[in-house]
Amino acid sequence: MLPLVTVTVTREDALRYLAATGEDDAHWPGIVPPLALGALALAALMDEMPLPEGVFHSAQEFDFLEVVPFDATLDLSIAVERRAERAGTVYTTVGLDLRYEDRTVCTGHATVVLPARVPAASS
Amino acid sequence: MNLPLGEPPVIQPLTRLVDQSMVDRYALAARDPNPIHRPSPEAEEGPFGRPVAHGMLVLALVSEVMTLGFGRRWADTGSLKVRWRSPAVPPISVTCRAALKSAHEGLAVYDVVCEDPTGVVLLDGTASARFL
Protein backbone atom coordinates (compact mmCIF):
# COMPACT_ATOMS: atom_id res chain seq x y z
CA MET A 1 0.00 0.00 0.00
CA LEU A 2 1.33 3.41 -1.00
CA PRO A 3 0.85 6.52 1.17
CA LEU A 4 -2.60 8.09 1.10
CA VAL A 5 -2.98 10.77 -1.58
CA THR A 6 -5.40 13.69 -1.49
CA VAL A 7 -7.52 14.38 -4.58
CA THR A 8 -9.70 17.46 -5.03
CA VAL A 9 -11.86 18.00 -8.11
CA THR A 10 -12.95 21.60 -8.57
CA ARG A 11 -15.80 22.83 -10.75
CA GLU A 12 -13.17 24.08 -13.22
CA ASP A 13 -11.51 20.64 -13.29
CA ALA A 14 -14.85 18.98 -14.01
CA LEU A 15 -15.82 21.49 -16.71
CA ARG A 16 -12.40 21.16 -18.36
CA TYR A 17 -12.81 17.38 -18.35
CA LEU A 18 -16.32 17.56 -19.85
CA ALA A 19 -15.21 20.06 -22.51
CA ALA A 20 -12.37 17.73 -23.46
CA THR A 21 -14.57 14.64 -23.73
CA GLY A 22 -17.46 16.42 -25.42
CA GLU A 23 -20.00 15.50 -22.76
CA ASP A 24 -22.73 18.03 -21.89
CA ASP A 25 -22.07 19.60 -18.50
CA ALA A 26 -25.83 19.95 -17.92
CA HIS A 27 -25.85 16.34 -16.73
CA TRP A 28 -23.66 17.17 -13.76
CA PRO A 29 -24.94 20.23 -11.86
CA GLY A 30 -22.72 20.72 -8.85
CA ILE A 31 -21.36 17.19 -8.85
CA VAL A 32 -18.27 15.59 -10.29
CA PRO A 33 -18.86 13.35 -13.33
CA PRO A 34 -17.91 9.88 -12.16
CA LEU A 35 -15.39 9.15 -14.88
CA ALA A 36 -13.76 12.55 -14.31
CA LEU A 37 -13.22 11.43 -10.75
CA GLY A 38 -11.75 8.17 -12.02
CA ALA A 39 -9.49 9.91 -14.55
CA LEU A 40 -8.15 12.37 -11.99
CA ALA A 41 -7.60 9.56 -9.51
CA LEU A 42 -5.51 7.84 -12.18
CA ALA A 43 -3.57 11.08 -12.66
CA ALA A 44 -2.85 11.15 -8.92
CA LEU A 45 -1.78 7.53 -9.14
CA MET A 46 0.66 8.38 -11.94
CA ASP A 47 2.09 11.19 -9.82
CA GLU A 48 2.82 8.62 -7.11
CA MET A 49 3.92 5.83 -9.44
CA PRO A 50 5.49 7.40 -12.54
CA LEU A 51 5.12 5.00 -15.43
CA PRO A 52 8.05 3.91 -17.56
CA GLU A 53 8.09 4.94 -21.20
CA GLY A 54 6.02 2.72 -23.46
CA VAL A 55 3.46 1.69 -20.85
CA PHE A 56 -0.17 1.63 -21.96
CA HIS A 57 -3.50 1.16 -20.22
CA SER A 58 -5.02 -2.22 -21.09
CA ALA A 59 -7.98 -2.69 -18.77
CA GLN A 60 -10.03 -0.71 -16.28
CA GLU A 61 -12.73 -1.35 -13.73
CA PHE A 62 -14.63 1.26 -11.74
CA ASP A 63 -17.44 1.06 -9.22
CA PHE A 64 -19.10 4.41 -8.58
CA LEU A 65 -20.77 4.29 -5.20
CA GLU A 66 -21.71 7.85 -4.33
CA VAL A 67 -21.83 11.26 -6.01
CA VAL A 68 -19.15 13.73 -5.01
CA PRO A 69 -19.68 17.51 -4.88
CA PHE A 70 -17.25 19.95 -6.47
CA ASP A 71 -14.26 20.86 -4.29
CA ALA A 72 -14.63 17.76 -2.15
CA THR A 73 -11.33 16.56 -0.73
CA LEU A 74 -10.98 12.83 -1.22
CA ASP A 75 -8.46 10.38 0.14
CA LEU A 76 -7.06 8.03 -2.47
CA SER A 77 -5.39 4.81 -1.45
CA ILE A 78 -3.44 2.84 -4.00
CA ALA A 79 -2.14 -0.70 -3.84
CA VAL A 80 -0.33 -2.85 -6.36
CA GLU A 81 -2.57 -5.91 -6.56
CA ARG A 82 -0.85 -8.01 -9.18
CA ARG A 83 2.30 -8.02 -11.21
CA ALA A 84 2.99 -10.68 -13.80
CA GLU A 85 5.54 -11.11 -16.54
CA ARG A 86 4.96 -13.17 -19.66
CA ALA A 87 7.57 -13.38 -22.41
CA GLY A 88 9.11 -10.14 -21.25
CA THR A 89 5.83 -8.21 -21.19
CA VAL A 90 4.95 -6.92 -17.72
CA TYR A 91 1.31 -6.65 -16.59
CA THR A 92 0.57 -4.64 -13.47
CA THR A 93 -2.82 -4.17 -11.80
CA VAL A 94 -3.25 -1.36 -9.31
CA GLY A 95 -6.24 -1.00 -6.99
CA LEU A 96 -7.74 2.40 -6.20
CA ASP A 97 -10.02 3.35 -3.33
CA LEU A 98 -11.42 6.88 -3.08
CA ARG A 99 -12.97 7.95 0.22
CA TYR A 100 -14.95 11.06 1.04
CA GLU A 101 -15.92 11.85 4.62
CA ASP A 102 -14.97 8.30 5.64
CA ARG A 103 -17.15 6.68 2.98
CA THR A 104 -15.85 4.88 -0.08
CA VAL A 105 -17.25 6.70 -3.10
CA CYS A 106 -15.33 4.99 -5.91
CA THR A 107 -13.15 1.94 -6.29
CA GLY A 108 -11.21 0.78 -9.30
CA HIS A 109 -8.61 -1.52 -10.76
CA ALA A 110 -6.29 -0.30 -13.51
CA THR A 111 -4.15 -2.70 -15.53
CA VAL A 112 -1.18 -1.35 -17.43
CA VAL A 113 1.15 -3.18 -19.76
CA LEU A 114 4.82 -2.64 -20.43
CA PRO A 115 5.56 -4.45 -23.70
CA ALA A 116 8.66 -6.55 -24.05
CA ARG A 117 11.53 -4.65 -25.62
CA VAL A 118 12.37 -5.86 -29.09
CA PRO A 119 16.13 -6.09 -29.31
CA ALA A 120 17.65 -3.77 -31.89
CA ALA A 121 18.68 -5.60 -35.04
CA SER A 122 22.42 -6.04 -35.30
CA SER A 123 24.02 -5.00 -38.55
CA MET B 1 -33.31 13.38 -6.64
CA ASN B 2 -32.63 9.87 -7.82
CA LEU B 3 -35.95 8.42 -8.96
CA PRO B 4 -36.30 4.76 -9.90
CA LEU B 5 -36.42 4.27 -13.67
CA GLY B 6 -38.87 1.37 -13.48
CA GLU B 7 -37.17 -0.66 -16.16
CA PRO B 8 -33.72 -0.83 -17.74
CA PRO B 9 -33.34 2.03 -20.22
CA VAL B 10 -32.53 1.43 -23.86
CA ILE B 11 -29.10 2.95 -24.35
CA GLN B 12 -28.77 4.83 -27.61
CA PRO B 13 -25.49 4.60 -29.55
CA LEU B 14 -23.25 7.65 -29.63
CA THR B 15 -20.65 8.56 -32.24
CA ARG B 16 -17.93 11.14 -31.74
CA LEU B 17 -14.93 12.23 -33.76
CA VAL B 18 -11.75 11.95 -31.73
CA ASP B 19 -9.07 14.13 -33.28
CA GLN B 20 -5.66 15.27 -32.10
CA SER B 21 -6.96 18.57 -30.71
CA MET B 22 -9.44 16.64 -28.56
CA VAL B 23 -6.67 14.32 -27.40
CA ASP B 24 -4.52 17.35 -26.52
CA ARG B 25 -7.37 18.91 -24.53
CA TYR B 26 -7.95 15.62 -22.75
CA ALA B 27 -4.27 15.33 -21.86
CA LEU B 28 -4.52 18.67 -20.04
CA ALA B 29 -7.91 18.01 -18.45
CA ALA B 30 -7.01 14.53 -17.22
CA ARG B 31 -3.43 15.50 -16.33
CA ASP B 32 -2.05 12.71 -18.49
CA PRO B 33 0.90 14.13 -20.42
CA ASN B 34 2.16 10.75 -21.69
CA PRO B 35 3.94 11.61 -24.98
CA ILE B 36 2.51 8.53 -26.73
CA HIS B 37 -0.68 10.62 -27.06
CA ARG B 38 0.85 13.39 -29.21
CA PRO B 39 3.17 13.58 -32.20
CA SER B 40 6.52 12.91 -30.56
CA PRO B 41 9.55 10.65 -30.85
CA GLU B 42 8.14 8.64 -27.93
CA ALA B 43 4.93 8.00 -29.87
CA GLU B 44 6.89 6.96 -32.96
CA GLU B 45 9.06 4.60 -30.93
CA GLY B 46 6.24 3.47 -28.62
CA PRO B 47 4.12 0.33 -28.75
CA PHE B 48 1.81 1.65 -31.49
CA GLY B 49 4.38 3.46 -33.65
CA ARG B 50 2.25 6.63 -33.78
CA PRO B 51 0.21 8.84 -31.45
CA VAL B 52 -2.92 7.23 -30.04
CA ALA B 53 -5.85 8.63 -28.09
CA HIS B 54 -6.02 8.03 -24.37
CA GLY B 55 -7.95 4.86 -23.60
CA MET B 56 -9.82 6.81 -20.94
CA LEU B 57 -10.99 9.28 -23.60
CA VAL B 58 -12.57 6.41 -25.55
CA LEU B 59 -14.01 5.08 -22.29
CA ALA B 60 -15.61 8.49 -21.72
CA LEU B 61 -18.12 7.62 -24.45
CA VAL B 62 -19.25 4.62 -22.43
CA SER B 63 -19.74 6.80 -19.38
CA GLU B 64 -21.64 9.34 -21.48
CA VAL B 65 -24.10 6.83 -22.97
CA MET B 66 -24.72 5.38 -19.51
CA THR B 67 -25.31 8.91 -18.19
CA LEU B 68 -27.83 9.52 -20.98
CA GLY B 69 -29.64 6.34 -19.95
CA PHE B 70 -29.40 6.46 -16.18
CA GLY B 71 -28.80 10.11 -15.30
CA ARG B 72 -27.40 10.68 -11.86
CA ARG B 73 -27.91 7.00 -10.99
CA TRP B 74 -24.84 6.32 -13.11
CA ALA B 75 -22.75 8.33 -10.63
CA ASP B 76 -23.80 6.43 -7.54
CA THR B 77 -24.65 2.93 -8.75
CA GLY B 78 -22.60 2.54 -11.92
CA SER B 79 -19.87 0.00 -12.62
CA LEU B 80 -17.52 -0.47 -15.54
CA LYS B 81 -15.29 -3.34 -16.51
CA VAL B 82 -13.55 -2.88 -19.86
CA ARG B 83 -10.54 -3.93 -21.83
CA TRP B 84 -8.96 -1.93 -24.64
CA ARG B 85 -8.57 -4.10 -27.74
CA SER B 86 -7.09 -1.77 -30.37
CA PRO B 87 -5.54 1.67 -30.28
CA ALA B 88 -7.65 4.66 -31.36
CA VAL B 89 -5.46 6.57 -33.81
CA PRO B 90 -6.77 10.12 -34.31
CA PRO B 91 -8.58 11.35 -36.26
CA ILE B 92 -11.07 8.55 -35.72
CA SER B 93 -14.83 8.38 -35.53
CA VAL B 94 -15.75 6.26 -32.50
CA THR B 95 -19.18 4.75 -31.97
CA CYS B 96 -20.19 3.45 -28.56
CA ARG B 97 -23.02 0.93 -28.23
CA ALA B 98 -24.54 -0.69 -25.16
CA ALA B 99 -26.81 -3.73 -25.40
CA LEU B 100 -28.79 -4.97 -22.43
CA LYS B 101 -27.33 -8.26 -21.26
CA SER B 102 -29.32 -8.89 -18.09
CA ALA B 103 -31.67 -7.20 -15.66
CA HIS B 104 -32.05 -8.80 -12.25
CA GLU B 105 -33.17 -7.40 -8.91
CA GLY B 106 -32.96 -3.83 -10.14
CA LEU B 107 -29.50 -4.10 -11.66
CA ALA B 108 -29.13 -3.74 -15.43
CA VAL B 109 -25.97 -5.04 -17.06
CA TYR B 110 -25.00 -4.01 -20.59
CA ASP B 111 -22.41 -5.30 -23.01
CA VAL B 112 -20.56 -2.23 -24.19
CA VAL B 113 -18.35 -1.76 -27.20
CA CYS B 114 -16.58 1.16 -28.86
CA GLU B 115 -15.76 0.64 -32.53
CA ASP B 116 -14.25 2.50 -35.43
CA PRO B 117 -16.28 2.99 -38.65
CA THR B 118 -15.03 -0.32 -40.07
CA GLY B 119 -16.14 -2.28 -37.01
CA VAL B 120 -12.74 -2.66 -35.40
CA VAL B 121 -13.30 -3.01 -31.67
CA LEU B 122 -11.38 -0.40 -29.71
CA LEU B 123 -12.80 -1.30 -26.32
CA ASP B 124 -15.31 -3.80 -24.96
CA GLY B 125 -16.66 -4.98 -21.66
CA THR B 126 -19.64 -4.43 -19.41
CA ALA B 127 -21.33 -1.49 -17.74
CA SER B 128 -24.05 -1.75 -15.14
CA ALA B 129 -26.26 0.47 -13.01
CA ARG B 130 -29.34 0.16 -10.85
CA PHE B 131 -32.70 1.03 -12.38
CA LEU B 132 -34.76 0.42 -9.20
Image (cartoon, rainbow, N blue to C red):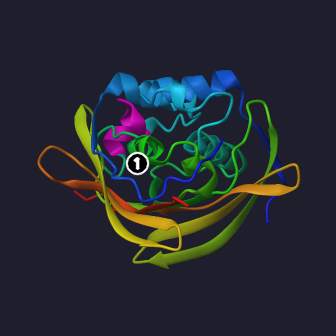
Compared to B57, does B19 lie above or below? Answer: above
Residue B126 figure quarter:
bottom left
Front residue (pair B30, A56): B30
Q: Residue furthest right?
A: A102
* Range drawn in magenta: B36-45
Compared to B78, does A6 lie above or below? Answer: above
Give the x, y percent position of residue B21.
Answer: 37, 22
Give the x, y percent position of residue B8.
Answer: 42, 59
Quadrant in the picture for the C terminus of chain B: bottom right
Compared to A57, does B68 lie above or below? Answer: above
Mark 1 secondary-structure assignment = helix
Q: Residue furthest left?
A: B118
Amino acid type shown at disc 1:
Val
Residue tagged by mark 1? B62
Measuring 45% from the left and 30% from the top, which residue is drawn there?
Answer: A23
Give the x, y percent position of residue B72.
Answer: 58, 43
Instruction: Verify whether residue B8 appears in magenta.
Output: no
Residue A46 in sight here: yes
Front residue (pair A62, A1): A62
Please indicate whether residue B115 sits to the left or right of residue B84 in the image: left
Could you tell me what secondary structure mostly forms the magenta stretch? helix
